[in-house]
Amino acid sequence: MATKLLKRKLGRTDFEVTTLSFGTMNLKYLSEQEAEKLLHQVLDLGINYIDTSRAYGNSEERIGRYLSKRRDEVIIATKCGCNPHLDKRGSGHVLSFDRPTLERNLENSLRALKTDCIDIWQLHGATPEKLIGGVAGEVVEFMQKMKQQGKVRYIGVSIRHGPNTEPGYPSRYGYECIQEYPEWGVFDLFQIVYGGMVRTSEDLLQYAADRGAGIIVRGVVRDYFDNFSALFAKARLNQLLAEGEDRRAFLIRYALNHSAVSSLLIGTNHQEHLKTNLIAASQGGLEVDRYLEAKKRFAQIGSKPGFLVGGIQAESLTKVTS
Ligand SMILES: NC(=O)c1ccc[n+]([C@@H]2O[C@H](COP(=O)([O-])OP(=O)(O)OC[C@H]3O[C@@H](n4cnc5c(N)ncnc54)[C@H](OP(=O)(O)O)[C@@H]3O)[C@@H](O)[C@H]2O)c1
């Protein structure tokens, strides 16, 4: 079975990214030895994009420690707006979007990653109203300045999905932000929740891509709710699985059918999962008949464009401003 990952252009950037990329949110739970092995395996398998954040514990430090000698093999995306010293386990990240925070984050990221330039520098979960002054405010101005100075190559937004107590979790912010941010014309990339089980933004990704933005999607195989596996079965999607294919492999291939998507960002702390994800991604999108039937069946469980998990129409909710 072919296991070579294809690459896709990342919006207006000059990067070509592998269709599977690696998320390091949970890397901090591994031992040093395990983290070193896994990070090398990611590159050995040909994956060329790794996502991290100032907020992911020692993830940046580990990437710097173990991969700095292989820097030219990897596109590193990290995030800013973080206050890791204030984060408390289980209560989400403490974020603030102002110049001093960004300045401090960038200095620390460059040092931790042992690099002199961040490839992709993203706001960690910022919604437009959090950016005082909008496109003309100090945050965008500072990000652009860092780009001009060569400290970062491209800038973007990693759009938040939480908290899980809010209606519309996990895709409402993505649905709203992806309609607004591309108009600003300054961000080179968006990272957004999208997949077969969460198709809310499916019809909007092309809109952002047409405006030059690269699209990285996350949440493709994540069970945001405990009933996702049961819902998949309820929609008789199991009947569409090919021999030897499991639910996650099918979801990976489904997401790759979207032509606006450059890469699927998936995190795992298990080498076996990394390999099976790679095998699925290497096969590309689903065959047309399975893809079209999958769309119909996802829709039967409420997963369709413009709809939130639970079958609520996204437009029916008042815009989130938190
Ligand atoms: N606001 C933000 O900016 C934001 C928020 C969240 C995440 N992120 C980024 O996006 C990345 C991906 O996050 P995500 O939310 O999509 O979730 P994720 O962290 O990738 O979670 C995927 C889950 O699925 C499991 N998994 C992966 N492959 C599997 C397989 N083949 N079989 C069984 N289980 C599998 C993983 O567990 P195992 O370890 O057991 O495989 C993990 O618990 C993160 O690592 C992070 O870099 C950004």
Image: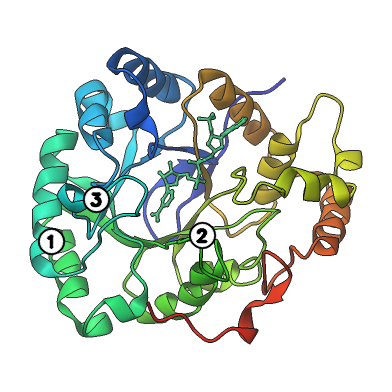
| Residue type of the residue flagged with mark 1 | Thr
Residue 280 in view of the camera: yes
Image quadrant containing the C terminus: bottom left
Q: Position of residue 76 (x, y in %)?
A: 31, 41
What residue is pinned by disc 2?
164
Q: Is residue 283 above or below residue 157?
A: above
Callout 3 environment at 10 Å: few (<14), some (14 to 19), or many (20+)? some
Q: Mark 1 and 2 residues: CB-CB less than 8 Å, in contact?
A: no
Mark-to-mark CA distance, 1 and 3? 14 Å
Q: Position of residue 314 (x, y in %)?
A: 63, 78
Mark-to-mark CA distance, 1 and 2? 26 Å
Task: Indicate yes or no: mark 3 CB to ligand 1 under 8 Å.
Answer: no
* SS state under label 3: loop
Q: Mark 3 and 2 residues: CB-CB less than 8 Å, in contact?
A: no
| Relative to 224, 109 lies left or right | left
| Relative to 26, 170 lies left or right | right
Image quadrant containing the N terminus: top right
Whichever of callouts 1 and 3 sits on the residue coming sooner in the sequence is 3
Q: Viewer-proximal residue, 294 or 283?
A: 294
Q: Viewer-proximal residue, 209 or 219?
A: 219
| Residue type of the residue flagged with mark 3 | Asp
State the image quarter where residue 128 is shown: bottom left
State the image quarter where residue 57 is shown: top left
Q: Viewer-proximal residue, 217 or 236?
A: 236
What residue is pinned by disc 1?
101
